[in-house]
Image: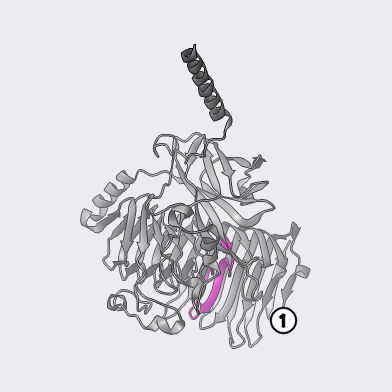
Amino acid sequence: MEAILKIVMSAILSLLTALGALISTPPKAEPDYPDVEARDFSYLQYPAEAVKTLKENGISLKKFKNRATEGDGEYGEARGHDDANGIIISPYYTLEINDYNIPVYSTVVFVGDTETGELHSFSEIYIDESTSLPLEIELDSDDYKIKEAICLPESLNVTTDVNKGTMTAKITGTGTYTFLFNDASQEAGFTLFVKDRLNEDATIEGLKAEYGEENVTVYDSGVHYLDYINVTKSNSVIYLRQGAYLIANHKYEINSLSDESLYVEEEALSSNSLGLTRMPFVNFGNCSNVRFYGRGVLDMTRLDRRERRGMVFTSCSNVEVIGPKIINSPEWSFITYNCENVNIVDVDIFGYRINSDGFAICSSRNVNVSRSFVRTGDDLFGVKGLGGYEGIHSKNITFSECTGWGGKARCFGIFGEVHTPISDVTFKDSSIIYRDATWDNDRVCSLGIIVEQQGGSISNVTYDNIEIFKDTGRAIGCLVYSDDIENFRIDNIQYKNIKYNAELPAKFTSNGRQNTINATIENVYSGGNKLTNADIITDQYAKVEVKN
């Protein structure tokens, strides 16, 4: 009898244990990402040894975000960091697309309205003609609770639905889909990059057949620690496979302006025509027919401010760059100088440091920048005339299908140095999410021609089909900014088919001194209202024709 009682009691205990397991909440498992090629679309996944959770890096969320605002010394907030790379696994979101788990990553950005560091989260997928559209996306939030959501740019016509902290939406093709949550906050934005699917092996073999195997350098998926890459040979190719993660080694302590002149690399002096004394992280100098392809990462988080520039092309021709992400450049992320015939596609740039400008197209001809996203700590898509050579100029430059999100300066335009003539520049079919720098509302704006240094002239600039979700300062500015500039001409500037929301009116002014501005405005809306002459600030030196 006693033995039977023990058996019964044991069975009851087992049953109670089983019931307890059923009603308790199991710990949340890490997402199980299936084979990247196991469906009719694929996705970007970074190597686990490079991109980790905050816990795995041993750093708090607050400390990670504070990189954008805190630090000791003159260059404190721009110092390098080695306790975690620039990209982490998102602490906010998990993503499913057509019921498949997709990795979500985050990086630090700066928000001007609040002067805080925040996280920008992103995922990237690849589609082709075999992909069944639309794609059903489902974004869940844990630490950051989604209550409402919108998708930008509005021209994508994507509707969202939020139910119990989960956002759903449908994606209908390639593009850059940026989602804002909870009254369109800048705190925790998410971007889904949807790009063309590639056969990397076939692409690499084709490049080797065209350029010669010895002229094609391939960085495989995984972590690569480098001082820099230097290419001075024509007919050269660098290819970063998906998941290649290139980390710039920190070598020089730069805590102040005076420290910048202490370190010189001899190879730099002969490898670029900008006069740089230290090598950029990626340098192409004095060469032709060169390519930089692939969906890898250039992460410069460990470098101090101005320790190196990002990706630089000087005195090059027939250049093509497709695919990489540039993270936390310590100074000017992407530069062309005295280059000709340049094609830049699908290059995304993130950063928070001052001087981490996105694209600086300087004194170059026949340049196209398309399908690129920039959110950095300075100007985003800019043209300059830096001079240096007799007869040098900037001409025939187009930015198309690009997205900007600016927290410290300007988005699309001609900024600062105009030492040499600039002409035939087009910004079209593009969008701005936010721009919220207001430290000088005559010097910073979304769509700007801001002349601070003279020597040349500006003519034939077009802004066409652009939408701006929110500018907390001035959306349109065309100004001769410096009081020292004289006899400067800004001719045939066109603004058409533009919609924006901004706190301040468009402004076209010169300082006199025989400077002139000639511009036209057509089909431009501010806050839903078509612009008229009464909505624009001008002076006697600016002739602005509003066509309605």
Q: Residue at x 60, y 59 (%)?
A: 464
Measuring from the top left, give residue 258's x and y in whole percent: 43, 85
436 or 444, which is in the foreground?
436
Q: Which residue is mark 1?
A: 540
485 or 251, which is in the foreground?
251
Decide if residue 46 is on the left or right side of residue 515: left
167 or 284, which is in the foreground?
167
Q: In which quadrant is the C terminus drawn? A: bottom right
Q: Is residue 423 above or below residue 225?
A: below
| Residue 407 is one of the magenta-drawn residues | yes
Colouring of the image: one colour
Q: Is residue 219 visible?
A: yes
Q: Residue at x 53, y 27 (%)?
A: 17
Q: Is residue 425 visible?
A: no
- Splitting the image into 4 quarters, where does residue 19 fall? top right
Decide if residue 184 is on the left or right side of residue 84: right
Measuring from the top left, give residue 67's x and y in whole percent: 51, 66
Write down the region rendered in magenta. Answer: 403-424
Q: Is residue 3 above or below residue 63?
A: above
Measuring from the top left, give residue 459's x and y in whole percent: 56, 73
Measuring from the top left, give residue 208's x and y in whole percent: 25, 51
